Image: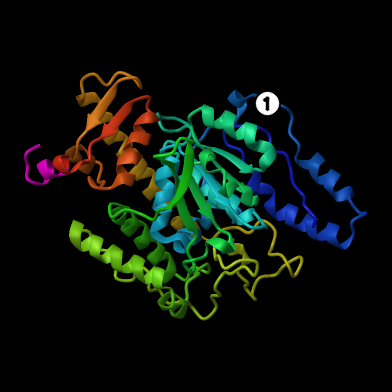
Amino acid sequence: MISVGVLVENSTRPRPWNHISALKRFAVRLEDSLEERDFLEAYFNQHKVPNTNSSEEEPWDGWEEEISRATMDHPAFHLSHVLQIMGISSLTVFKHALGRRRILIHTPPPVESACLLAQLAAVISTGEEGASGVHAQKIAVLGVVGLTDLKRIEEVSAQGNGWIACTTDAIFLEKTQLYDLLIDLSSRAQQRPQRPSLSVSRFSEGSNIKTYKLQSVRYTWSDVKLWTELDRILEADFEHGHPYEAYATKSRWLDPWGLYDDVCIVCAGIWTGWKPSATTSYRQSSSESTPVTNSNSNTQLRLSTDMKDSSRKSIDPRLGPLDVSPSTRAKVTALGLLSAFHNHTDFLHSRLTEFLASTPGAVGIETETVMNPKDVVAFDLGPGSELDARFLEWLSETRGKKVKVRRGWKDLFRYIFGFA
């Protein structure tokens, strides 16, 4: 096994993906000739920068400027592929990241796809303002962690801003007290074809010893509205011939959990008045498209750059071209998806600001503010959903406020019949 990497300067907006294409080529060259390493030093000398303060960094000009100068190695261009693979359950990851929870991604080697997912979860949960604003502090991405990083994980957890990390160590599956959400990409978790397994860590009551157990989680009906908007963007991207379509019609119909998702989305749409797109999940793949798979596991969450295109010219037959420039359609899709997430983030924070401003006594984390089902509905969330209730409590904690969502039968009865 050959591994090549770089240490990126610590900054508010590091861009390690700018080196991905070159590092892949270096790994191939080292595999062919391990003794030849002069090109590594030459690359380092070419790209090293002098020490600079964060105040001297380039000003943030928004995502449109960021995307305009990025290559296909930028995580944003893989967002559509990840959404297609994870489906509406990806919004559960979004809620945990936005609520600044501790998220662990367990994956078999190679870890590139898991790390990409971690970066995307951080990007979509930061907010439209990017480098400024009340919700601009990005959730920490710890990268690949192991047992030697336990102290570091505890230190970052104590800061209260959450984190996202990847690991190949199965021992973390037993250390459920360390994280709030587990995304399992390993073969053992593939009880559902084409779907990564999501589990939340819950405190096990009724025991003298403080223990945590994993409980499977998917999504809530309130996610349908945002998912419908995202799906329209994905559908438009597919209609224009996006090369990263991962689903074939046959495999989609053979996926019972995929059909279950579609039926639930339709039912939720009818119940709430939101009409999902007619082609939400049943999209036909073009003749050139190929399902993205991995021989080591059944999971299909893999980089879209693994797709083969006979028209591409490559320096090495195992690699694509260096620094591929994204098409206009890819840029439009990436910006559209990011805008949908960021606009929804801004909406949730604006609603929270209004609620806290109208609530007397909401002065700090030590003072608990009660939120009733009517207040929950104002956020376009489900008053009967436990996950939505927890999400609002997490979101309030990021603002230094303590909120308790009331969702008992009496509270729901009063809301339904207009008594409160």
Above or below, comparing residue 151 to residue 173 in the picture: above
Query: Image quarter for residue 275?
Result: bottom left
Taking the image as shown, residue 7 lies to the left or right of residue 178, namely: right
Image quarter where the N terminus lies is bottom right
- Under circle 1, the secondary element is loop
Q: Residues within 10 Å of mark 1 (few under 14, many from 20)?
A: few
Residue that label 1 marks = 52
Above or below, comparing residue 181 to residue 29 in the picture: above
Image quarter where the C terminus lies is top left
Residue that sits furthest to the front in the current view? 208
Above or below, comparing residue 192 to residue 157 in the picture: below
Q: Picture coordinates of residue 218 (x, y %)?
A: 39, 56
Write the residue at 38% across / 58% down: 88
Q: Is residue 336 visible?
A: no
Q: Is residue 179 visible?
A: yes
Q: Is residue 351 magenta?
A: no
Which kind of residue does numbered mark 1 sit on? Thr
Write the residue at 34% across / 68% down: 260
